[in-house]
């Protein structure tokens, strides 16, 4: 049996290791298109902070880890797929035949239609090469403008602040992290950042980037008419799945690759996992993209088991976000935005930066958002993921949402 995995991020690595554990004899090839060993993009901000060296971003630390498992690492770019011949077509000219194929190609940064994005000094923060370029320019006192204040943007922001730059964030939404935080929570995070010296513009777009008159600097023109001088501009405006190489293949895509509960595509023997997979959502039952590492790893494990002939089905990908923004911990789970037919309760303590929002359908907690309540993170996830019937505790939580730990323990004891 020959397994080929396209993409050597967390999903690809976990799938390869799972396959090897199940089948000691199978051929396993893991393809990546960057020169570094498999590494975590989520570790790049820690590299920029100076907390870890480049090797600290590597997903597996032993130099011979993959060789020791009999997993072949191949550096190449996949540019096509012939599913009729079960062949992967590489940019180098290689053609690799597979019995089972996993597509774990991840995603790439969105490039907004902004004039001047091709100027020197404009970067994304997605690859090791990007991180090196940012480190070179983000010296103490440097004027840095960041476009986007989503999940990834907030992680990058912390790295930039640690480097002592003068940081301005421009977000087109009405709050920070609008795709994972309620309006109250997103506004609270903005106020926290502003209190730590970060200038934040919301409801604002970058209209253009031009070369400033003073040397190598940039001038960032906003749609408000304001202009921001910058030595470095970082674009963090979201990501899109890497599916372009599948054009002309038989694999069905919407925004990402459509997969079933076993992570299989519409083509027999072809699977997908991670940021590229449009899988069943735990909360809604619809297919969606859920680009977070815990889901990517679980999808990879499920795909590998099915590739090896051990049928297993996913319960669906759960929206799960935990974010550290300059020391303020926030989280959101499940259907955090709520349901028109459900009930909700919101606790707000602006001065203490504590916030809790609970979303219910009948007597089940289906979504939650929290700030400054780290001890509740596991409880909120457990109640939502377990679809725990709260019974009388639902009404108690509507009156006193901070009793969520008591509700969890009481329901667990009753179930036992």
Image: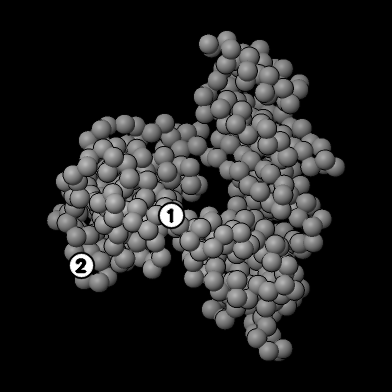
Q: What residue is drawn where x is 51% and y is 64%? A: 54
Indicate how the structure is coloured in the image. one colour
| x 31%, y 48%: residue | 16
Graded by Cα atoms within 10 Å as few (under 14), some (14 to 19) or many (20 or more), the crowding at tag 1 reads: few
Label 2 environment density (alpha carbons within 10 Å; few <14, some 14–19, many ≥20): few
Q: Name the residue at the left extreme.
A: 85
Foreground of the two, 135 or 344: 135
Q: Is residue 156 above or below residue 177?
A: below
Instruction: Give residue 94's quadrant in the image.
Output: bottom left
Q: Kindly tell me whether residue 44 is visible in this rendering.
A: yes
Vertical placement of residue 229 versus 311, above or below = below
Q: Which mark is residue 61?
A: 1
Q: Is residue 107 left or right of residue 119?
A: left
Callout 1: helix, strand or loop? Answer: loop
Tell me the quarter of the picture where residue 320 sits.
top right
Q: Position of residue 88 (x, y in %)?
A: 22, 60
Disc tally is 2
Mark closest to the chain's N terminus, 2 or 1: 1
Residue at left offset 61%, top offset 28%:
379
Res. 254 in view: no
Residue 115 image point, x, y percent: 58, 77
Q: Which residue is mark 2?
A: 94
The image quarter in which residue 64 lies? bottom left
């Amino acid at each position: 049996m020959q397994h080929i995995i396209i993409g050597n991020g967390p999903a690809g690595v976990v799938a390869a290791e799972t396959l090897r554990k199940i089948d000691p004899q199978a051929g396993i090839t893991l393809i990546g298109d960057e020169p570094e060993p498999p590494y975590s993009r989520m570790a790049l901000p820690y590299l920029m902070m100076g907390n870890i060296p480049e090797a600290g971003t590597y997903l597996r630390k032993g130099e011979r880890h993959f060789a020791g498992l009999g997993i072949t690492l191949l550096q190449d770019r996949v540019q096509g797929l012939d599913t009729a011949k079960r062949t992967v077509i590489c940019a180098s000219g290689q053609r690799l035949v597979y019995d089972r194929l996993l597509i774990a190609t991840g995603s790439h940064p969105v490039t907004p239609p902004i004039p001047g994005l091709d100027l020197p000094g404009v970067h994304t923060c997605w690859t090791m090469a990007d991180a090196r370029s940012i480190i070179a320019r983000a010296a103490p006192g440097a004027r840095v403008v960041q476009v986007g204040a989503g999940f990834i943007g907030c992680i990058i922001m912390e790295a930039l602040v640690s480097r002592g730059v003068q940081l301005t964030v421009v977000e087109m939404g009405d709050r920070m992290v609008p795709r994972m935080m309620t309006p109250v929570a997103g506004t609270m995070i903005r106020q926290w950042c502003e209190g730590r010296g970060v200038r934040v513009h919301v409801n604002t777009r970058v209209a253009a980037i031009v070369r400033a008159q003073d040397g190598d600097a940039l001038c960032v023109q906003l749609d408000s008419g304001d202009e921001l001088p910058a030595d470095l501009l970082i674009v963090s405006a979201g990501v899109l799945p890497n599916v372009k190489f599948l054009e002309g293949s038989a694999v069905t895509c919407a925004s990402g690759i459509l997969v079933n509960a076993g992570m299989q595509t519409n083509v027999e023997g072809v699977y997908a996992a991670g940021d590229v997979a449009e899988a069943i959502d735990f909360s809604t039952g619809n297919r969606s993209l859920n680009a977070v590492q815990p889901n990517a790893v679980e999808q990879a494990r499920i795909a590998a088991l099915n590739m090896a002939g051990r049928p297993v089905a996913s319960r669906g990908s759960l929206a799960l976000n935990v974010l550290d923004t300059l020391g303020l911990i926030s989280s959101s789970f499940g259907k955090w935005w709520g349901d028109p037919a459900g009930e909700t309760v919101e606790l707000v303590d602006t001065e203490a930066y504590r916030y809790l929002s609970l979303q219910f359908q009948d007597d089940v907690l289906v979504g939650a958002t929290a700030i400054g309540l780290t001890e509740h993170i596991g409880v909120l996830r457990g109640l939502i993921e377990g679809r725990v019937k709260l019974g009388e505790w639902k009404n108690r939580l509507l009156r006193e949402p901070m009793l969520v730990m008591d509700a969890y323990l009481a329901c667990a004891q009753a179930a036992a």
